[in-house]
Amino acid sequence: MAGNGIFAEILDGDVFKYYADGEWKKSNSGKSVPIVNPTTRRTHYKVQACSQEEVNKVMEAAKAAQKLWAKTPLWKRAELLHKAAAILKEHKAPIAECLVKEIAKPAKDAVTEVIRSGDLVSYCAEEGVRILGEGKFLVSDSFPGNERTKYCLTSKIPLGVVLAIPPFNYPVNLAVSKIAPALIAGNSLVLKPPTQGAVAALHMVHCFHLAGFPKGLISCVTGKGSEIGDFLTMHPAVNCISFTGGDTGISISKKAGMIPLQMELGGKDACIVLEDADLDLVAANIIKGGFSYSGQRCTAVKVVLVMESVADSLVEKVKAKVVKLTVGPPEESCDITPVVSESSANFIEGLVMDAKQKGATFCQEYRREGNLIWPLLLDNVRPDMRIAWEEPFGPVLPVIRIGSVEEGIHHCNASNFGLQGCVFTKDINKAMLISDAMETGTVQINSAPARGPDHFPFQGFKDSGIGSQGVTNSINMMTKVKSTVINLPSPSYTMG
Ligand code: G3P
């Protein structure tokens, strides 16, 4: 149970504590932030509303702890990460329970998220040992005008304090995808979890606490974005921000100043279906890609662009699968569960009503109860409809019929987003040409978009983000290159 057993010390009455200086603490603000269960629409948990003064203390501790951590041998950093990963996986049940209650993640997917997170932490420890254990050795005589009088040694050193801001849809996995690379690279880490998902994140942080990381190295501050959001992202002690979420990331980028940023801000992933595609495979991937976690994934299929000649057949196949999706509470691991908030449900409904008014074909009747929206496929969507461009982050999927592949590529590239996309065809040559033409960070051939496996590079173009993630890229991004040049009094050539 959440807040019980080994997790009892993170709870004070009915409010979860925040984590600073190696301890679980109550905020001096005396205030808390309620977390509403998307299914019941009632307050389920409460977390501390930390103050700016408390953020300042966390940053001071993070700076001090980082100095010592950077001097901790790499193998020891890796050892602690492996320990944290094991504790996390051992205690997957209470953490998954939080995900079910805070963000209505289907129970089976909630457990998967925690296990995947433990695996990511371990992989990161191993990868860090490999890539941070190596540097470069350069000699000067490769550049015109130079003799071999200079030897340059480069290594990767930590940035300092990394601020991690994960989104509600993966509050554990997208937190550890920032925490683990930061720590293995010798940084300290301040986590600001999303409000919905904060309790799962606090439980995850406790696993790191139990693993025995030094005091102050990891902190987790909860509270209102309006009070501590800008204060955190503009804090002078922060040396790097890794953010996943919505377009708040654009304003963070503008305010953050001269520090490295890693941003993933959503997508409108297109699924281009050619005439020769295996339509059963496409339909299965549209269901998985468009409707898993009720479409609340940055990498969800968010628009299907299908060749007119196969569109009727594909729509029939998808419709047949949509009726089989189970709709209901996350506790029962239903396929479709309530979306995260009432405002999110209202936004989705706005897109649906706009499409209705402009003449889209409803393959199912639109149905909503509270935050629960039944899966909906909208056929014959046209570019003048909002749903053709905006991301619903819900179980509603538009189908646009195209007359040529070029039309599909044009629609994909006209989007402000450029996260992922996919193309279905049996012709690998065509697939490669289309992949090259699509302005997205990743193109999947014959499968739905997805971030994982978590060591693959993951990046968005345009408004979808900056920087590249995935274990190796994140470790590299959270370091800077340091050179030492040995200057010789006279040229020295190997073997004489
Ligand atoms: O930010 C990425 C997330 O929304 C999707 O991740 O693993 O479901 O593809 P995944």
Image (cartoon, helix red, strand yellow):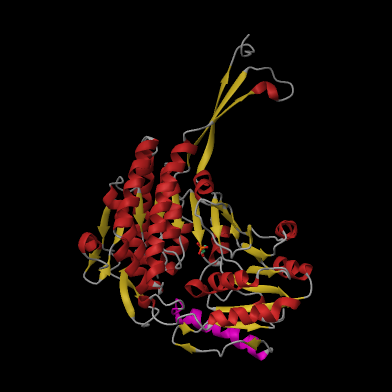
Residue at x 79% of width, y 75% of height: 403
In the figure, 265 relative to 156: above or below? below
Write down the quadrant of residue 302 in the picture: bottom right
In the figure, 334 relative to 188: above or below? below
Secondary structure mostly taken by the magenta-highlighted segment of the chain: helix
> Is 440 left or right of 37, judged from the image as shown?
right
Residue at x 43% of width, y 52% of height: 120
Q: Quadrant of the N terminus?
A: bottom left
**Where does residue 100 sit, x and y in percent of width and height?**
36, 72
Q: Quadrant of the C terminus?
A: top right
Residue 182 is at least partly visible in this image? no
* Foreground residue among 295 and 413: 295
**Where does residue 430 sit, x and y in percent of width and height?**
75, 60
* Foreground residue among 30 and 361: 361
> Is 406 left or right of 146, judged from the image as shown?
right
**Where does residue 259 sit, x and y in percent of width and height?**
54, 49
Residue at x 60% of width, y 12% of height: 489
Image: magenta residue range:
337-357
The reply to whether the magenta stretch includes residue 486 is no
**Where does residue 184 sit, x and y in percent of width and height?**
42, 43
Write down the quadrant of residue 328 in the picture: bottom left
